[in-house]
Amino acid sequence: EDSAGRVELERCLEQFAPVEILLPGPTLSAETEAALEKFLALSKSTVKVRVVRIDAEEYGYSKSCSSLAQFYASDKNLLKAALELPKTAAVSLSVVVTYFKRMKLDRALKAKLERWTDIDNESKCGSFMNLNGTTLRDLEVVKSCMGIEN
């Protein structure tokens, strides 16, 4: 059921090479967990990736809207901007806010939100060739584009 999302996850992991990943917990599907473990095993040679599990309830859209409303209550402009984000961006921002609050870094997120609007890729999917993570790694596309050498 989640195979399309898993392919997108593999592609994003390979393309962005994150050093920290926020995931709904406690676990994902067995296939997605396997894909994640494969990525983590391959990335250990370059940099250690930190995986943080956040309660799956935090990933719901209605929960995200109420969390953002509470977080941005003191700034009506930021609240309006946060609530006008595409659903995927709003949920992502809410999860990051939750995570940053745990580390007492949440004030950094009370800044302009223009960058978050690019996260909604649903309207852009048809205009690019999507390659899965394995293909990108094998072709060394990201490393070549960024000038990274092995």
Image (tube, rainbow, N blue to C red):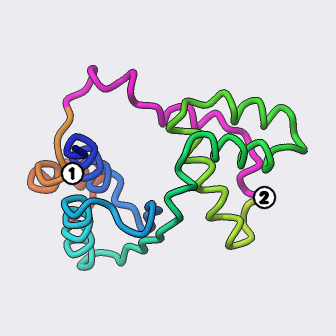
> Marks 1 and 2: in contact by CB < 8 Å?
no
Disc 2 and disc 1: Cα gap in Å?
A: 36 Å
**Closer to the observer: label 2 or label 1?**
2
Residue 68 location, quadrant:
top right
Secondary structure at badge 1 equals: helix
Task: Using residue 111 as the reference point, say whether residue 47 is left or right of it.
Answer: left
Q: Which mark is residue 58?
A: none
The residue lying at 38 percent from left, 73 percent from top is: 49
Q: How far across and down, in percent of the image, does residue 113 sit?
A: 67, 38
Above or below, comparing residue 150 to residue 63 in the picture? below
Secondary structure at badge 2 equals: helix
The residue lying at 44 percent from left, 66 percent from top is: 25
Q: How far across and down, in percent of the image, does residue 102 sit?
A: 68, 71
Q: Which residue is mark 2?
A: 107
Task: Using residue 108 as the reference point, say whether residue 75 is left or right of it.
Answer: right
Q: Is residue 33 magenta?
A: no
Question: Looking at the figure, which quarter contains the N terminus?
Answer: top left
Q: Amino acid at mark 1?
A: Ser
Q: How far across and down, in percent of the image, does residue 28 sit?
A: 33, 61
Q: Nearer the viewer, residue 108 or 146?
A: 108
Characterize the local packing of mark 2: few (<14), some (14-19) or many (20 or more) Cα atoms within 10 angstroms: few
Q: Which stretch appears magenta?
A: 107-129
Q: Which residue is mark 1?
A: 144
Q: Amino acid at mark 2?
A: Arg
The residue lying at 77 percent from left, 30 percent from top is: 80
